[in-house]
Image (cartoon, helix red, strand yellow):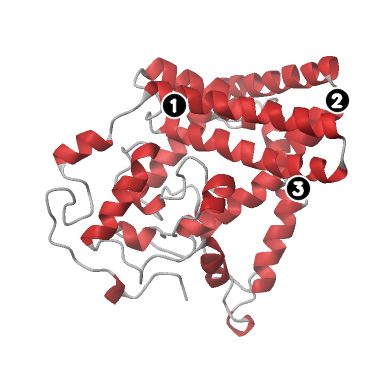
Amino acid sequence: MNMVPDSAVFIEIGGDDKILSNGHPASQWRTELRHIPNLRNAISIASIYVQTVGIIWTALALRNPITYVIAFLLMGRAHAQLLALMHESVHRLLFRKRKLNDFAGRWLLGYMSFVNTDGYRYVHMAHHREEFGPNEPDIPLYANYPITRASFWRKMRRDGLGSTGFRMLRGQFVSVFNKKLPDQNVQQNTQRKIFALHTVLLILSVIFVNPWVYAMLWLLPYITVWRVMNRLRSIAEHGGLRADSDRRVTTHSVKQHLFSSFYFVPFNLGWHIAHHTDSGIPFRSLPKYHRQLRASGFVTDAYEYGSYLAIWRALRSRPKSLTNAK
């Protein structure tokens, strides 16, 4: 049992002046799609910081329990925003100048959410070279779907209560002092930079506000809210699929709606079949590219899920009688 659609769902297209038979954009249109708008992307990064400061300031000013809860949930979105643009930098699509692209990807985006950007680039490129291949780094995250409802909710509880996030963050911290790691100098130096940055954030929180602001409105949302979001997004992208040269077999497609685009998959992260069909297209062009994939027949209603709720229901639809999954 898996999540691969019936082969009848996949229509073989003839190709046209914009979309080739394999779904890739034709060369002339691809050049248009690949434009990287430096200024707009810089504004996008700045907007994350402005939003984050504004949310924290509002929560502290109102001092209302409901406001704190909303701020807590929105901080999960802030991490999702940072890492969505870090992902863009990993593909070197954030800024045209590589040094600027990589600096922003590390110090302004990835490190802020405890991610070693260069390490992520290494494993993520393996993911794109062959989804579900022998070097696929993320198989443990989305293998064996669909699972039972009980198994699904156990995973959600572990993520939501911070068990997954704390374990992974502790592993990062311990790795700083682990002398047995391969390439330890590079890995450890990067982890030291990450924890040094967060030490500075904690100190700023202590000096200008109080310690709990960093702990409760940055660190805790990262190990709880964002972990839930990350798992839900990941399984909606590739859960239960398999290796194939046709990206429609390796990657799900989910119709995008206003709330999910705002909170759950910011910066067009949800247009995932378009991203995997041509990973060299910047995020701002993905909706246009996806529309053309639909117009050509490469993406159809029979293949695309109508919402994230629909795909999550399918991902937890395995009958208990078929598995003892945990």
- Of mark 1 and mark 3, the one earlier in the sequence is 1
In the rendered structure, the answer to whether residue 295 lies left or right of residue 119 reads: left
- Of mark 2 and mark 3, the one earlier in the sequence is 3
In the rendered structure, the answer to whether residue 30 lies left or right of residue 124 reads: left
Residue at the spot of label 3: 162
Distance from disc 2 to disc 1, alpha carbons, whole Å, reads 32 Å
> Of tags 2 and 3, which is closer to the observer?
2
The three-letter code of the residue at mark 3 reads: Gly
Residue at the spot of label 1: 41
Of residues 316 and 121, the one nearer the viewer is: 316
Q: Which mark is residue 211?
A: 2
The three-letter code of the residue at mark 2 reads: Pro
Label 1: few (<14), some or many (≥20) within 10 Å?
A: some
Distance from disc 1 to disc 3, alpha carbons, whole Å, reads 32 Å
Mark 1 falls on what kind of element? helix
- Of mark 2 and mark 1, the one earlier in the sequence is 1
> Residue 157's x, y, as percent?
74, 58
Q: Residue at x 36, y 68 (%)?
A: 303
Q: Which mark is residue 174?
A: none
> Residue 241's x, y, as percent?
43, 64
The three-letter code of the residue at mark 1 reads: Asn
Mark 2 falls on what kind of element? helix
Q: Residue at x 15, y 40 (%)?
A: 27
Rendered image quadrant of residue 286: top left
